[in-house]
Image (cartoon, rainbow, N blue to C red):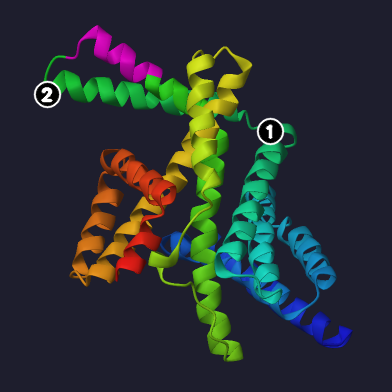
Amino acid sequence: MNSSNATKDGIMYGAIYLVLLLVAFFVPVLSIFILFTLPIPFLIYTYKHELSHSVIMFVITMTISSIFLLYISLPLTLLMGLGGSAIGYGLKQKRKSYETLALGTLGYSVGIVLVYVLSQFFFQVNWSQEIQNAIDESLQTFTSFYDQVGELSEEDLELYREQMYLMIYKIPSMIVIAGLAFAWITQWLGHKIINKMEGDKLKFPPFREFSLPVSLIWYYFAGVILLLIFPSPEDSMFLVADNLTTLAGVLLALQGLSFIFFLVHVKKWPKVVPMIVVILFIIQPILLLYPLRILGIIDLGLQLRGRLTKKK
């Protein structure tokens, strides 16, 4: 596609992004829904044009958007541009769906880190203090609630306080998990829109086919062992071990969840079964996280899907 068309499309998609951004600012009722569509102009433009053109469009759009509410629009455009462009590039290169999802996760994760750095050093936003304040407010709410419904021992309160403060150390893995969730939504929307516009047939494969490398088990257990060796948050390796265990554990839980979908498909059980599991996982993630993680480890370690397929 020639440079003239790339320029015209760059102006058009840049304008679409700016309109969506203004709607999100001035129509609060729609802001949550608009938020998920903001990366789409970058995604589509990168899918249709060369990466060099996409970079130029991204920089120009970010510059123009900074005119409106600089403290919000600049970081937001940086985040949405990186995430949407990364997914668009993956789709353009005909990468497999989950490879594209990994690129999108990387794009969003890098974007979140850059937003953190930008706001910390240029906009004087002290995120450490903000997180500390959020934890303190949560502790106050928790204490007030239990004061109304019953007594709360000092030991229980101290345990809850320690668990809350430990969440600070999980920020790196939480960034990646947030990037993964947003990348999935963006890619799913991108598939739908590109299929309508270009007549393609982009889609995620069935979730039952989702499978991670067996080596993930070893990463998880390496993190567990490191936590046993360096159990104190004061240890420099604690941060690495804690985030490695958290991130690998979440991915193994997804592996276990996909195995349930696979098992239901092979055994021809009612499709409502995995739906119930998903709903319970959303409502009570802590309750099902560990059983699903164990199931994921067993599935990968014993190659259960291959065994079930052979039996069939």
Classify 4 as above or below 279: below
Query: Which residue type does callout 1 highlight?
Result: Gln
In the rendered image, the residue lying farthest to the right is 3
Query: Mark 2 highlights which residue?
Result: 149
Alpha carbon separation for disc pair 2 and 1: 40 Å
Q: Residue at x 50, y 79 (%)?
A: 192
Classify 201 as above or below 167: below
Question: Percent position (x, y) of residue 229?
Answer: 53, 15
Tell me if residue 245 is in the magenta stretch: no
Assess whether mark 1 and mark 2 are in contact (beta carbons under 8 angstroms).
Answer: no
Q: Residue at x 86, y 86 (%)?
A: 4
Q: Is residue 36 something one can see in this rendering?
A: no
Tell me if residue 156 is in the magenta stretch: yes
**Residue 53 picture quarter:** bottom right
Query: Mark 1 highlights which residue?
Result: 120
Q: Residue at x 64, y 52 (%)?
A: 106
Magenta stretch, residue numbers: 152-162
Question: Percent position (x, y) of residue 216?
Answer: 52, 44
Classify 222 as above or below 277: above
For this view, does 124 lie left or right of residue 160? right
Disc marking residue 155: none
277 vs 196, nearest the viewer: 277
Classify 307 as above or below 298: below
Counting other residues with Cα less than 10 Å from the Cα at mark 1, is it few (<14), some (14-19), or many (20 or more)?
Answer: some
**Residue 145 picture quarter:** top left
Sequence-first tag of 2 and 1:
1
The N terminus - image quarter: bottom right
For this view, does 32 lie left or right of residue 158? right
Q: Is residue 196 something one can see in this rendering?
A: yes
